[in-house]
Image (spheres, helix red, strand yellow):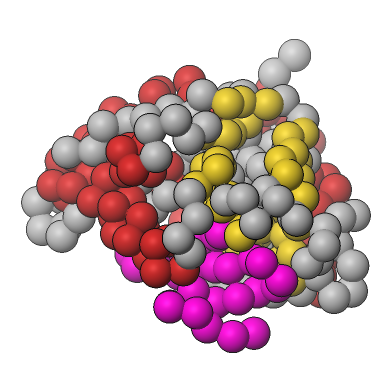
Amino acid sequence: MTTTSGWREVGDRCFARRYEPFDVTCGVVVGDAGLLVIDTRMSTRQGRALVDDLSALSSLPVHAVLNTHLHFDHTYGNAALRERWPDVPLVAHETVPADLVADECRIKDRYRDEPDDPCRDEVLATDLVTPDAVFSSVWSVELGGCYVEAVHPGRGHTAGDVVVRVPSADVVYAGDLVEESAPPAYGPDSWPLEWPQTVELVVGLLSERTVVVPGHGAPVGKDFVLGQRVDLADVAGQVQALAAAGVPVDDAVARGSWPFGPELVEHAVRRGYAHLARP
Ligand SMILES: [Zn+2]
């Protein structure tokens, strides 16, 4: 793998770049006719820096921008891409526009309460630009000499996770369904009981040589994804068993033997119990 203007070449025509804070990854697929940009960082200011980094990589226009899921560290730079390329479609799963709007208060309240966070002002100043080219199951684009597929393999990290596959390069951008620099992030909008099956479908898209670009961290291979699937299935299985045994939700974290820390598993347990209680 080589580096071009700060971008890491993860496969033919495929690039990735890791950004602080949160060690979030943005991806780029370079076709003969234009670029596909995958995720846009966490504020309009950071999105503008991404636009600058894109021009250092290629002089071609951005053909489409894709958000792998709704979370602000992947979507709040959308305005900057639109500012630079006003007609560019913003692609995402069909749940993302409404969920992004619904999540805005939670995110901005969080930053409002963090006066010392260096990103506070830029996050609060960011205007949401929601995806306008949504899809349910699959989306594809021909970038000129390069065909790209996006798939919603099911719910997991969020309700609208999408992975992007570049078959000719054998590269998959996995968003936060796979994380390398931190454990899988179970949040208040996660689907812990479905996440293992969703990753199983992603595994079906991988060869032994596929480069998997996670939403956070360094590129990984199929073995790493399989290992993460084991841990996700462990958590889902324990949540189901504890609920079936009648263990109260407030006691469940302490009663399990988890592959991740209790603060992470808390959301998995609460969301799992809530989903099991639904008719
Ligand atoms: Zn996320």
- Which quadrant, please, contains the C terminus? top right
Q: Say if 162 sits above or below 175 in the image.
A: above
Q: Which residue lies furthest to the left in this view?
A: 115
Q: Which residue is drawn at 64% across and 85% down?
A: 1
* Of residues 164 and 31, the one drawn nearer to the viewer in this rendering: 31
The answer to which image quadrant residue 77 occupies is: top left
Camera-nearest residue between 225 and 235: 225
Question: Is residue 79 left or right of 210 when viewed as pictured?
Answer: left
Which percent across, then down, holds residue 180? 59, 70
How many numbered discs, if any? 0
Question: Principal SS element in the magenta part?
Answer: strand
Magenta stretch: residue 98 in it? no
Q: Residue 208: x, y in percent?
A: 89, 74
Q: Residue at x 73, y 35 (%)?
A: 139
Q: Tell me residue 172's x, y (percent).
A: 72, 60
Q: For this view, does 199 lie left or right of residue 8?
A: right
Q: Quadrant of residue 5?
A: bottom left
Can residue 101 be seen in this snapshot? yes
Question: Which range is magenta?
Answer: 1-28
Q: Is residue 109 above or below residue 4?
A: above
